Image: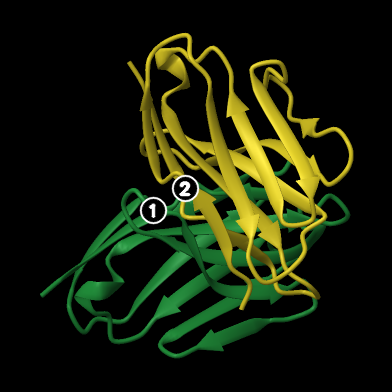
Chain colours: A green, B yellow
Amino acid sequence: KQEVTQIPAALSVPEGENLVLNCSFTDSAIYNLQWFRQDPGKGLTSLLLIQSSQREQTSGRLNASLDKSSGRSTLYIAASQPGDSATYLCAVEQGGSEKLVFGKGTKLTVNP
Amino acid sequence: GAVVSQHPSWVICKSGTSVKIECRSLDFQATTMFWYRQFPKQSLMLMATSNEGSKATYEQGVEKDKFLINHASLTLSTLTVTSAHPEDSSFYICSARGTGDDGYTFGSGTRLTVV
């Protein structure tokens, strides 16, 4: 059974810092990995999608990497801003299942 | 990009009543939609997979008679919580996959409170 773990559970940083969020998964037979952002009481906003054949994806200040063999992904946020404060969720899609398995998320607070 | 609309965003109902939540894909057709449930400070748990024109597939432990799913068209799936009880209070979110390898798009969620 696939399990997804996100570390740390919470992170508080001053504005301007670069930071890394970690995601690990137990079964490397994934189709893709997706990072989402969730604001309190809201739905999920997709940030980056990495196919299993890819190593990384970039969008603006965000960079996500994937090491499928070791079961790890990182989300790098450059020059953090207070508006980045949210919970970041990592999810993997199992090969052939169309089902997403989520981690519990990392709650990020960026202080002005 | 793909957009999924979910309504209502919040609802309060009395115990014993039923509540319907709608999930629409606005600019694409979705043969498959997914319903998740999220408890406070917990991650999303898949409840069921909604298939257009056929019965939904429920995850283990999810009562299919309590959580009725209908996917009557390629752009609309509904989740009906029947005979709701306070323990059904939760945040419900739907998702669908766009065309190609775009990953999943999520609705804005529905906060259900049963009193």
Q: Chain of mark 1?
A: A
Q: Quadrant of the C terminus of chain B?
A: top left
In the figure, is residue A77 to the left or right of A15?
right
> Which residue has dot 2 on it?
B109
The local crowd at label 1, few if under 14, some if 14 to 19, many if 20 or more residues have their Cα within 10 Å, is some
Residue at image coords 71%, 74%: B102
In the figure, is residue B114 to the left or right of A90?
left
Q: Nearer the viewer, residue A34 or A25?
A: A34
Is residue B58 depicted above or below B115 in this figure? below
Is residue A43 depicted above or below B19 in this figure? below
The local crowd at label 2, few if under 14, some if 14 to 19, many if 20 or more residues have their Cα within 10 Å, is many
> Which residue has dot 1 on it?
A42
Q: Nearer the viewer, residue B48 or A17?
A: B48
Residue B14 in the image, given as x and y percentages of width and height? 38, 15
Q: Tell me the distance, in whole angstroms, between the alpha carbons under discs 1 and 2.
A: 6 Å
Type of amino acid under label 1? Lys
Residue A90 in the image, given as x and y percentages of width and height? 54, 59
* Label 1 with label 2: CB-CB less than 8 Å: yes
Could one spot residue A99 in this view of the protein?
no
To which quarter of the image does residue A33 belong?
bottom right
